Image: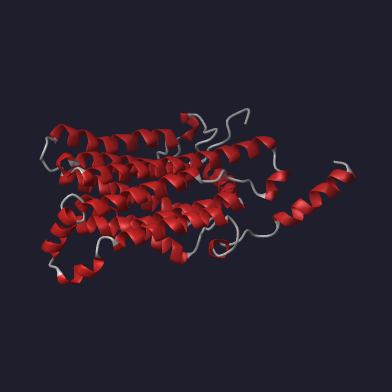
Amino acid sequence: MSEGSQLALQPAAEESTKPPASFPNWAFSAVDRLRKAVGLGAILATAWSIKNLHPERWMTMSKENLNEFLKETVSHERAVLAFIQAAACFLLALLTPKPKLPVRALLQDEKEKARDFQACRRIQLFLITIYFTFSIYYIVTGLQLLSPQYHDDIVSMTLNAVQGLLFFWLYLELAEITVDAPPLALAESNDGFYGAAFQRVVSSGVFAMVVVPAWCFYSPGRSVSGFNIASACLTGVSLALVVGRLGSKRIDPGALVLGLLYFYSVIQPLAARFPEEPLAQVLATTAALPLKVLLWLVCVWAFTTGILAEYVHTLRPLLQSERGTKEPSGH
């Protein structure tokens, strides 16, 4: 390398030694103000919509009367709340940034650089798909509230199951080798590891075991609460797995943030009570939106600071070392 090239790379090398901002510092900085403003605006719009549900009356009502009040009297306002949340999730999906490589990548092999970017890009696309699915879920919820005679909890249950499956596949992107994966014969190790593709097939079968029987069992007016519970629990587990990967020391947005995201996964089973408990739906979905925004902001931080790219770059050799695999020839 010429002396001029070395001098050109020297500032980049010096910059690469600076650690990226922690999530709390990034969250309260002026970086990505538009995205942060959209997330905050969604939360404020939800809070304004809650006001129209007359929460000041709730304390004077019994649980049965309150559920009846929410179900009959303010169903239109609940639909507005659902549509606001649908719009918020749609905007978050649209505003999800492309991942950036750290400055260190300037000194990296071109094939490795392309592979790291592709791995981050797959994670980004899964996240976008999840938030679009959230938006569809809330649109369906709002339409059901506007036309209670067409209320069908099996549609919501199916969408919830799709969300859970997507979360599990996002976990696989964060935890396994999915770009330039070794052949199946090389991927198997002593503990029976078969790679992300095999796990996707198995997970699809598990979720299908909930959704398909529900549709076979279903008839108008017939409850599918048991399938709802199973679907919601699977979604909660999948989300918890994603949060666990975000808690890796290579990402780690902080204990408080991780605690809130784990709480988000814990409240997922409440979705099974939505058809019978309007209060559970209002409280859970209202609490869920700020947590959805928080999860999205953590991902935006990881994308834009290069932390995610650093994570996938170091994860690959670690997994190969643990499982005794090697790079396919030509990569």
Q: Position of residue 64 (x, y in %)?
A: 11, 62
- Work out whether 279 lies above or below 93: below
Residue 207 seen in the figure? yes
Which residue appears at 48% of the width and 43% of the height?
Answer: 94
Image quarter hosting the C terminus = top right
Which residue appears at 36% of the width and 45% of the height?
Answer: 134
Q: Is residue 284 left or right of residue 292?
A: left
Image quarter hosting the N terminus = top right
Q: Is residue 3 left or right of residue 307?
A: right
Q: Where is residue 86 in the image (x, y as percent from the top left)?
A: 36, 47
Which residue appears at 16% of the width and 32% of the height?
Answer: 216
Q: Where is residue 73 in the image (x, y as percent from the top left)?
A: 17, 56
Name, please, the residue furthest toward the bottom.
60
Residue 191 seen in the figure? no
Which of the two residues, 119 or 90, is positioned nearer the viewer here? 90
Determine which quarter of the picture holds residue 260.
bottom left
Which of the two residues, 202 or 57, is positioned nearer the viewer here? 57
Scheme of image coloration: secondary structure
Which of the two residues, 48 or 2, is positioned nearer the viewer here? 48
Determine which quarter of the picture holds residue 288.
bottom left
Which residue appears at 14% of the width and 68% of the height?
Answer: 61
